[in-house]
Structure formats: structure tokens, C-alpha cells
Image (spheres, rainbow, N blue to C red):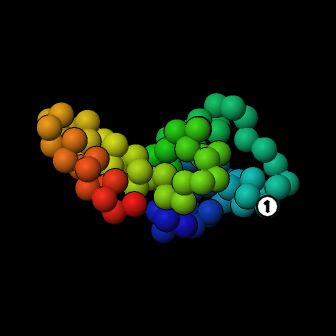
Amino acid sequence: MLKNISEYQMSLDLRHSKSYIHSISSGRALPSMSEFISICEYLGITPKEFFDDENSNPMLHGDIIDALNEISDSDAELVLALVKKLK
């Protein structure tokens, strides 16, 4: 839902039948491990993030981490101080 992509479109993007993702989300089928990894890659999340019930927006968290990896340590410390202040 966060990616604003339908189950139908996701199924086609992953090169499956149009009902593939719906059958998984409805509990009628389970993906293979390789398909699960493909689904996670498609969503831009790790398998750990997929199962993390406490993280309501893993894509956003991933984007934040990617951005943090690109800044200096001193800037990262400023971001950490800001986050702690916002808590």
C-alpha cells in the first residue's frame, strides 16, 4: 500500500499470474524462499524488515539509513541529537 501498487500490478511486475500476490496475501498460498526474497527486493525492504511488526514504514526507515550512510560522522551525530530531542 505504501508503494501505491496493486496486487495485480505487483504480480505482473514479478512475472507471475495476475492473482499471484492476492493468493499470498489472502493466505491461500506461500511463496518459495527465492520468491519471498524477490518480493522483498521489489518492495525495497529486507526480510527482517518484512517481519518487523513494530516498524510501520520500513521503506522510509531504509531511506533514512541510506541517507545517513552518505553523511559525515559529525552530521550523523547532529541527526542523532535531533532524533533524541524529538522522542
Q: Which residue is mark 1?
A: 26
Residue beneath the point at 79% across and 61% down: 26
Q: Nearer the viewer, residue 20 or 43?
A: 43
Q: With 11 as the anchor, is 2 left or right in this view?
A: left
Quick one: quadrant of the N terminus? bottom right
Residue beneath the point at 34% across and 63% down: 86
List x then y, in percent, for residue 20.
71, 54
Query: Which image quarter: residue 19?
Result: bottom right
List x then y, in percent, for residue 51.
65, 45
Q: With 31 as the anchor, is 48 left or right in this view?
A: left
Q: With 7 as the anchor, is 85 left or right in this view?
A: left
Residue beneath the point at 61% across and 63% down: 8
From this view, report whether residue 55 is shown above or below residue 37.
below
Residue beneath the point at 64% across and 31% down: 34
- The answer to whether residue 49 is visible is yes
Quick one: quadrant of the C terminus? bottom left
- The answer to whether residue 13 is visible is no
Q: Nearer the viewer, residue 87 or 71?
A: 87
